[in-house]
Amino acid sequence: MNAQKQAKTYSTAEVASLAQVHRDTILRWLRQKLVREPARDRKGWRIFSEEEARKIIDFAGSGYDISGVAEVAATYATFSELRALEAIDWDFTNAKTSYLTHGLHPYPAKFIPQIPNALIQELSSVGETVADIFCGSGTTLVEALTLKRNAIGIDANPLACLISEAKIARFIEGDQELLYSIVKKAQELADALSVQEESLLFPIEFKSKAECPSHQAIAFWFEPFVVEELAEILSWCRNLPTEASRKVALTAFSSIIVAVSKQDSDTRYVRRDKKLASGDVFKRFARVLSEAAKAVVEFTEIVEPRFQGQIHQTNILNAPDIGEVDLVVCSPPYPNAFSYHLYHMTRMVWLDMDQPTFKKEEIGSHRKYSNKGQNGATIDTFKNEMTTIFLWLNKHLKTNRYACFVIGDSIIKGQKIHNADVLSHVAQSCGFQEMLRINRIIQNTKKAFNPTIGKIKNEQILVLKKMRGIQ
Ligand SMILES: C[S@@+](CC[C@H](N)C(=O)[O-])C[C@H]1O[C@@H](n2cnc3c(N)ncnc32)[C@H](O)[C@@H]1O
């Protein structure tokens, strides 16, 4: 018999099983040209020669004997998965970051989607559940759903939850038209107001019975004509009849608030006058909502309905019940870096959100750390909070699975704190082990940091593995 005919070949699934990685992982390695593309059989299926299979198995780990039984220790699989992570260039220089719904709303310190994307692909499989326990604006959730995983998000910030819900919303028939009808209304009002010569205020004939919030912050942060235009838009958004259209419209509304207020920027809570003309708010809203609607249509088309996203608006320290998850990817609040309750204050007032409760619950807020005296937070405050979180996480993450934390350093009372070290140490006392630490350079346009706290140029991706359960 011809020797070539007798040579053993392997299917993709067999190679994946021998290499102890998911089939999707092999397909991705092939796409990325990390391993060689094999020949195909008549039906177009890949057939790997023994040598090609061995190379992949070697790439996944080292020297596993493919002629033997596929009995590989868990640590071996671990090694193979993490090895692929090491091959990635994590700086993602020039990567496009606002595709799909990622650009719906600004969010200080949101991470670039390429980070959760790579971690989810490597460390979980199709159909599994990925959680972001500090989901912020929902970056991980969008990536998990597009990669055919289920997604769970937690955040104490009600605004973060609204944005996340909008970003993973899927339209039903008619939603897009509902949004376009208010885009059109806003555009028409913008055009009518831009030719008005006298008062900046919104003429009575255009007005509905929209109510402005009575909070004192409104008059302090907004011009009167801006308040009128915002109130009108808000009433349209609130009256939308479907959940998805309402959430997307409210998110678009929120996204323009800082730009039309006197707040300097998304991470600077000081006043400055901005040159706005009558109709500008309507114009801006029309543009932003029209883009948001397009993005959600695209997201709806891409994500299969069987993959579900769930968002819990809650303080993580209250140990929410999220069931069991297969992977965690998150970027926790850094101690002393941001004060989301302040940066989002004007938005939360407009949206009638409970800002005082979030202010109390917010971990890491600059306000708490700059507070002098007994009530001021210290690095021990952060360590204790993280211990509570890792003990809770130990109950919800499956054993031998991963929790990835993206975090940079911070400065507390003049002292530099290596947050990755702090997290790793705390995690270890809660049944986790650090398996890999990746240092990445932050592109200065990609992450918004409070400039008064110092510029953070690097961050670490900490890959922790749950080794054992803790009672
Ligand atoms: C660095 S941000 C996460 C950004 C996110 N990765 C993204 O891409 O948008 C940290 C998040 O932790 C949230 N957070 C702070 N304290 C919290 C708490 N006690 N419980 C739950 N979430 C909290 C903040 O609201 C913020 O959204």
Image (tube, rainbow, N blue to C red):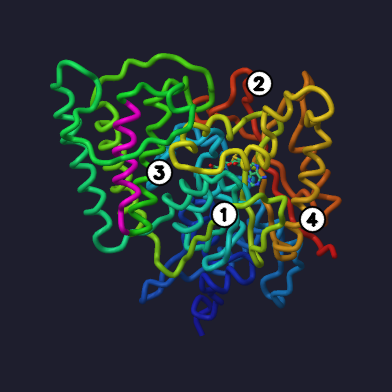
CB atoms of marks 1 and 2 within 8 Å: no
| Label whose residue precedes the other's in the sequence (4 or 3) | 3
Residue at position x 83%, y 54% in the image? 430
38 to 165, vertically: above or below: below
Considering the numbered disc 4 on the image, is that residue within a helix, a strand or a loop? helix
In primary-sequence order, the first of circles 1 and 4 is 1
User: What secondary structure is marked by label 2?
Assistant: helix
Q: Overall secondary structure of the magenta stretch?
A: helix
Question: In terms of sequence position, does the residue under pointer 3 or pointer 1 come before the other?
Answer: 1
- Dot 4 surroundings within 10 Å: few (below 14), some, or many (20 or more)? many
Residue 365 screen position, x and y as percent: 67, 32
Q: CA distance from mark 3 to mark 1?
A: 17 Å
Q: CA distance from mark 1 to mark 4?
A: 18 Å
Which secondary structure lies at badge 3? helix
**Residue 300 colored in magenta in the image:** no
Residue neighbourhood size for the residue with mark 3, other residues' Cα within 10 Å, grouped as few (<14), some (14–19), many (≥20)? many
* Ligand 1 falls in quadrant: top right
For mark 2, what is the residue? 453
Q: Which residue in the protein does label 4 denote? A: 391
